[in-house]
Image (cartoon, helix red, strand yellow):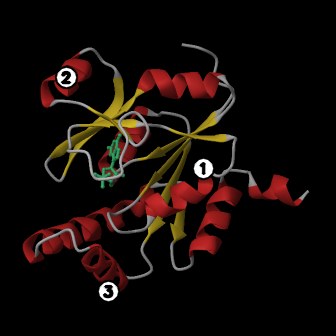
Amino acid sequence: MAQRKGQMVVISGPSGSGKSTICKKLLEDPRIVFSVSATTRKMRPGEVDGRDYHFLAIDEFKRRVAKGEFIEHAEVFGNMYGTLRAPMEEALAEGKISLLEIDVQGALQLKALGEPGIYVFIAPPDFEELRRRLKQRGTESPEVLERRLHKAEDEYRERVKYDHVVVNDDLARAVREVREKIGLEAEARR
Ligand code: 5GP
């Protein structure tokens, strides 16, 4: 394994917590690189293979799981998602912050493995707000929406296992708080 000069930062939280928006903002800092996950889900309009995800067929995903290429993988809403070890190690060897935006199961797998990093849980301000956000996205049927909310509630209970919990009630504030937790904000002020 190459020597790790950088740091792994795991951002996770329930679906609809706004974690991807926070990650987009964090990525404006050139010291942070996005860990591009692999997934078996279909590409959405506007997404680019290799930038947003490595879009893989199920067989290919399974083959790479068997080869041990993932440091974690999980099934989320019927699709497989996983973090590839090699690109993450490369970023860390270059002294970058490798940003993983992954679901709660994946984050807890990494924690259980003792994978060194900073684990941040993004919490929705409240569940009514989460319901509203998921509805607004408009991509789910009422049953799927209910299932997602239940899952979000279960995942919310896991927040105690993280190093930090950041409540996403105000985007700019939440981004600043995450940057502080990963030691970037203090530097910016100096
Ligand atoms: P979406 O399909 O909306 O892009 O992502 C669905 C969920 O999968 C999100 O909660 C996202 O954070 C999570 N996810 C994305 N990549 C990974 C990954 O590599 N591992 C795990 N465990 N979850 C991931």
Q: Which residue is mark 3?
A: 128
Q: Residue furthest left?
A: 143
Badge 3 crowding class, 10 Å Cα cut-off, few under 14, some 14 to 19, many 20 or more, is few
Say whether residue 171 is left or right of residue 131. right
Q: CA distance from mark 2 to mark 3?
A: 39 Å
Q: In this figure, what is the number of numbered marks?
A: 3
Q: Is residue 67 above or below residue 103?
A: above
Mark 2 vs 3, N-terminal side:
2
SS at badge 1: loop
Residue sitting nearer the eye, 140 or 152:
140
Mark 3 vs 1, N-terminal side:
1
Q: Which residue is mark 2?
A: 60
Q: Quadrant of residue 135?
A: bottom left
Q: CA distance from mark 3 to mark 1?
A: 29 Å
Mark 1: is the Cβ under 8 angstroms from ligand 1? no
Q: Quadrant of residue 65?
A: top left
Say whether residue 66 is left or right of residue 51. left
Residue sitting nearer the eye, 5 or 171:
171
Residue sitting nearer the eye, 155 or 143:
143
Q: Which residue is mark 1?
A: 27
Q: Could you tell me residue 42's position as x and y percent? A: 20, 45
Amino acid on which disc 3 is placed: Glu
Q: Could you tell me residue 48's position as x and y percent? A: 37, 41
Q: Residue furthest front?
A: 46
Number of the front mark, 3 or 1: 1
Q: CA distance from mark 2 to mark 1?
A: 29 Å
Q: Could you tell me residue 175's position as x and y percent? A: 61, 64
Number of the front mark, 2 or 3: 2
